Image: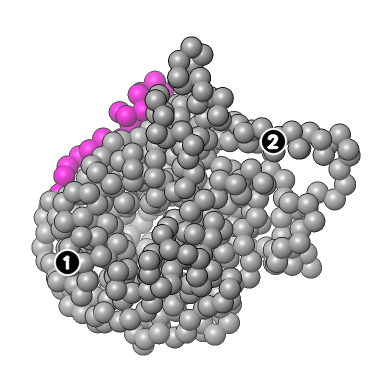
Amino acid sequence: MPNGPRVLTAVSALGIALIGLLFLSPAAGFITSLSGSIEEHLTLSPLGGGSALAQMAPGPAGLAYVANEGSGTISVIDTATSAIVKTICLGSDREDDLPGTPGAALAAAGSPCDAEADHHKPFYDGHVGTHGLWLTPDGRILLVTNRISGTIVAIDTATNTILGYQPVGREPHLATVRPGGREAWVAVRGENYLDVLRLNRERLFEPGRIATDRLDSRSFIPTVLGPSMVSFTSDGRWAFVAAGKQPRVDKIDAEERAIVASRVLPAPFTPFGLVSPDDQELYLVHKGTGQLSVLRTSDLSPVISGLPIGGCANHVAFAGRFAYITIGGAPPCAPGGVDREGKIVVFDRDAHKIAREIAGPELMGDPHGIWPTPDGSRLLVGHERGNRISIVDLGSPTTAADDRVIGTVTGTPQDIAFLKQPIDVVIAAPLGVVSAAERSRERRGHGRD
């Protein structure tokens, strides 16, 4: 039964003309400026509904957020309909793009949705290199890491407005929220430290407070050269730091802000590290060599060291007893090189071996960011070169044999046009609803903040 996004079945000639005018307007349909104002837009699915999604069953409730590094935007996706419902723009502040100044040209070009076109021009005051994403435990605040502008942006997910932002060091890669929701630890890849930001709800939402005073640095933690990602145990006590420039991983006592253990790794370029849902293991992806290592979180001893999984290995997502690892394909890695077929490696976390690979033309274009829906039944996968989001159905939770790509995310021509270099994906349960992962933490005694 067709139950994908709603399709417009009967439109008058006048209605079609109005929709055409909307699509031709460069500024129409874009959501936020740096000042935090919001401009709603009409979301229509492509006429005809000819994609695989027209025959696809509705997905679980939730909202996905996708970082589009190529356009400086965030796509907001309704996981039930698999359609983009909002585009949040992180470009120049339209309220500052006044007539008589060079900023007027930015406004004419469609600010705040002008990051791709205008980031190098005078008076551009937006963010550049939208990359890593992370949510607070309740899903209320989205933290967006912008590599080139060196800024962390806080977004209110209830309104899709920008709350504030904080400049950090050179080339930040990801701001990970510590369990409890009161801090975010920023892996600053151009430095050798972590920048710990305070997340104070009253401060973030206080009317009249200037944008750069809503997030503030609490401390700096010296660590490995080129830290790329921080991952915590579910109680927030231990932090693990993967690095992009040194073959080492650090374990940090989060309360004491001190390194308590380190281990040499098989390769220096390890941009991704994620603690398993049971807190027992740390999964590390060595992108440059296409390998996976699994370490025990207790003492960093290896369970698996340097397992070959495929060129340009990227991110890991956990669903059930499996780890799903995106593989871009043979080097050079995106955004360089050419389009080639990627894959998803399915790793059995109980047996510690590869269970299968999901491959095929649907995974062309460098699969990169990956995240499970709140109920663990689907995965959303961003294609760094393919400029699309694939949907993977996980079938039975006890086997990986029936996992398959079932379609791609849809949206208006406007929204799809901004889906450029989708590098990272995170998914939140609807506000007020506790996800399966959060319920698991509560059962282990780690309640939500």
Q: Position of residue 367 (x, y in %)?
A: 47, 66
Q: Residue at x 49, y 16 (%)?
A: 98
Furthest residue in direction top, as rendered: 100
State the mark number for residue 24.
2
Where does the magenta region start and end? 201-221
* Picture quadrant of residue 349: bottom left
> Which residue ends up furthest to the front in the rendered image?
337
Q: Nearer the viewer, residue 413 or 12?
A: 413
Please determine whether, in this image, residue 146 is positioned above or below residue 340.
above
Give yes or no for residue 217 being in the magenta stretch: yes
Q: CA distance from mark 2 to mark 1?
A: 50 Å
The answer to whether residue 325 is above or below residue 398 is above
Q: Quadrant of residue 109?
A: top right
Colour basis: one colour
Residue 200 is drawn in which quadrant?
top left
Q: Residues within 10 Å of mark 1 (few under 14, many from 20)?
A: many
Q: Residue at x 29, y 47 (%)?
A: 172
Magenta segment includes 338: no
Q: Of helix, strand and loop, which one carries label 2?
A: helix
Taking the image as shown, residue 58 lies to the left or right of residue 137, namely right
Identity of the residue drawn at 30% across and 28% down:
213
Residue at (46, 33) in percent of width and height: 118
Task: Judge from the rendering whether residue 331 lies leftward or rightward of residue 49; answer left or right.
Answer: left
Front residue of 236/128: it is 128
**Which quadrant: the N terminus?**
bottom right
Query: Does dot 1 land on a helix, a strand or a loop?
Result: strand
Earlier-in-chain disc, 2 versus 1: 2
Counting from the top left corner in percent of width and height, residue 10 is at 88, 47
Looking at the picture, which amino acid does disc 2 mark?
Leu
Q: Inspect the image, locate mark 1, and give the three-letter code of the amino acid beneath it.
A: Arg
Residue that carries the numbered disc 1 in the rendered image: 248
